């Protein structure tokens, strides 16, 4: 349905197809990555000829620090010596 290519300086470029009823389908890979599900409402802004969509973060997506409390007793607070060896002052 859509074609995806990567532009180093401009992010990803998507080619989407509009059906005879004016609907656009987002590729499954995009929906999965953004956590978009059926019947989600997606805010969009039209500025000149640019249509920008800004889906709200899905509750299924987790931040990189999700569950960090579990690391409390396992992560050294000062990893300097562990990573770089003895540090003489």
Image (cartoon, helix red, strand yellow):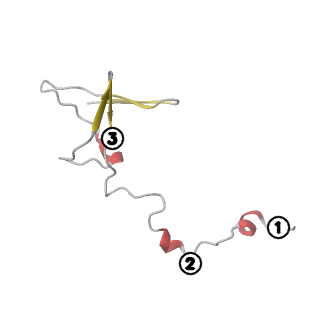
**What residue does disc 2 label?**
73
Report the residue marked by disc 1.
87
Q: Which of marks 1 and 3 is nearer the N terminus?
A: 3
Residue drawn at 28 percent across, 36 percent down: 44
Picture quadrant of residue 77: bottom right
Query: Which residue is at 56% across, 78% downward?
Result: 73
| Front one among 2 and 63 | 63
* Mark 2 vs 1: CB contact within 8 A: no
Q: Are marks 1 and 3 in contact (CB under 8 Å)?
A: no
Q: Where is residue 19 in the image (x, y as percent from the top left)?
A: 17, 26
Compare marks 2 and 1 and give the one earlier in the sequence: 2
List x then y, in percent, for residue 47: 33, 26
Above or below, 31 against 14 in this view is below
Label 2 – label 1 distance at C-alpha? 24 Å
Query: What is the secondary structure assignment of the residue under circle 3?
Result: loop
Front position among marks 3 and 2? 3
To which residue does mark 3 refer? 54
Tell me: residue 57, above or below residue 51: below
């Amino acid at each position: 349905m859509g074609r995806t290519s990567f532009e180093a300086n401009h992010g990803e470029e998507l080619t989407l197809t509009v059906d005879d009823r004016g609907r656009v389908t987002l590729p499954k890979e995009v929906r999965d990555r953004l956590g978009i599900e059926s019947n989600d409402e997606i805010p969009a802004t039209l500025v000149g000829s640019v249509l920008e969509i800004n889906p709200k973060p899905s509750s299924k997506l987790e931040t990189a620090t999700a569950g960090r409390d579990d690391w409390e007793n396992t992560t050294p607070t000062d990893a300097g010596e562990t990573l770089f060896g003895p540090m003489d002052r």
